[in-house]
Image (cartoon, rainbow, N blue to C red):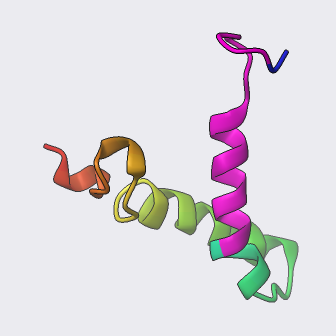
Amino acid sequence: MSRKGQCLDNAPMESFFASLKKELVYRTTFSSRHQAKAEIFEYIEVFYNRQRRHSAINYRAPCQTY
């Protein structure tokens, strides 16, 4: 399943979850499951999707590509 050209390769998701863990989860102590869900949602929707620089788009934030 990890051979070159496999459509089921999960490398992009592994990269995303590594970033999520390094940038949020390992740096934060959550007091409840609800707080963890809220902060992870905010990380994904506000920071990762809008502000974080991505190598795939020449190290620009997604909001700068348009």
Q: At x 79% / y 72%, what residue is drawn?
A: 34
Relative side of 17 to 44, left or right? right
Count of marks, rendered view: 0
Q: At x 69% / y 15%, what residue is drawn?
A: 4
In the picture, which quadrant includes the N terminus? top right
Q: Quadrant of residue 52?
A: bottom left
Q: Quadrant of residue 53?
A: bottom left
Magenta residues span 3-22
Residue 51 image position (x, y, % from top left): 35, 65
Q: Residue furthest front?
A: 4
Residue 64 image position (x, y, % from top left): 18, 54
Q: Quadrant of residue 11?
A: top right
Q: Is residue 30 above or below residue 40?
A: below
Q: At x 74% / y 77%, what residue is drawn?
A: 35
Q: Is residue 27 above or below residue 48?
A: below
Q: Is residue 17 magenta?
A: yes
In the picture, which quadrant includes the C terminus? top left
Residue 16 image position (x, y, % from top left): 63, 50
Magenta residues, dominant SS class: helix
Q: At x 67% / y 11%, what residue is drawn?
A: 7
